[in-house]
Image: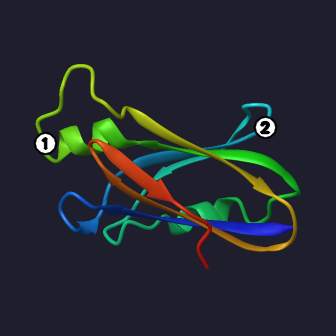
Amino acid sequence: MATLSTHVLDTMRGKPAAGMQLWLEDAGGEALFAGETNADGRCPELLERVPELATGRYALTFAVAEYFAGEDVALPDPPFLGDVRIAFGVADGGHYHVPLLVSPFAYSTYRGS
């Protein structure tokens, strides 16, 4: 079994993305968690409410356009990035950290530590 955490950074402003909505689903689309990032751009409730993940496919989705609109960033209609979905696989035990570095027009992710 594996554990999961995330961290979202607003690269447009160079700060943690506080208050960004996110959710976790399994490969079948079943909702496993819904929450939001804290002032540090992290979501400790994810690890608390989903303490273990079995081997398989999952997706973390982040409400990027909603976050930037809430930060009074002028977005095109429709926004270039609405929700950012990161589909990833859990192949073994250990910890999976899935950070998101995001602006209204670009994002990056990787398996962190």
Helix, strand or loop under label 2? loop
Q: Quadrant of the N terminus?
A: bottom right
Q: Residue at x 79, y 64 (%)?
A: 52
Q: Is residue 61 above or below residue 4?
A: above
Helix, strand or loop under label 1? loop
Q: Residue at x 27, y 61 (%)?
A: 11
Direction from residue 29 to residue 35 in the image, left or right: left
> Upstream in the sequence, badge 2 or badge 1?
2
Q: Residue at x 72, y 31 (%)?
A: 29
Q: Residue at x 59, y 61 (%)?
A: 46
Please, which residue is most extreme toward the top here? 77
Q: CA distance from mark 2 to mark 1?
A: 33 Å
Q: Report the residue marked by disc 1.
A: 73
Crowd rating for badge 2 (residues with CA inside 10 Å; few <14, some 14–19, many 20+) = few
Direction from residue 89 to residue 54 in the image, left or right: right
Q: Report the residue marked by disc 2.
A: 27
Amino acid marked by disc 2: Ala
Direction from residue 31 to residue 76 in the image, left or right: left
Amino acid marked by disc 1: Val
Direction from residue 78 to residue 110 in the image, left or right: right
Give how far across and how far down residue 48 sits, in percent: 64, 67
Give how far across and how far down residue 113 sits, in percent: 61, 79
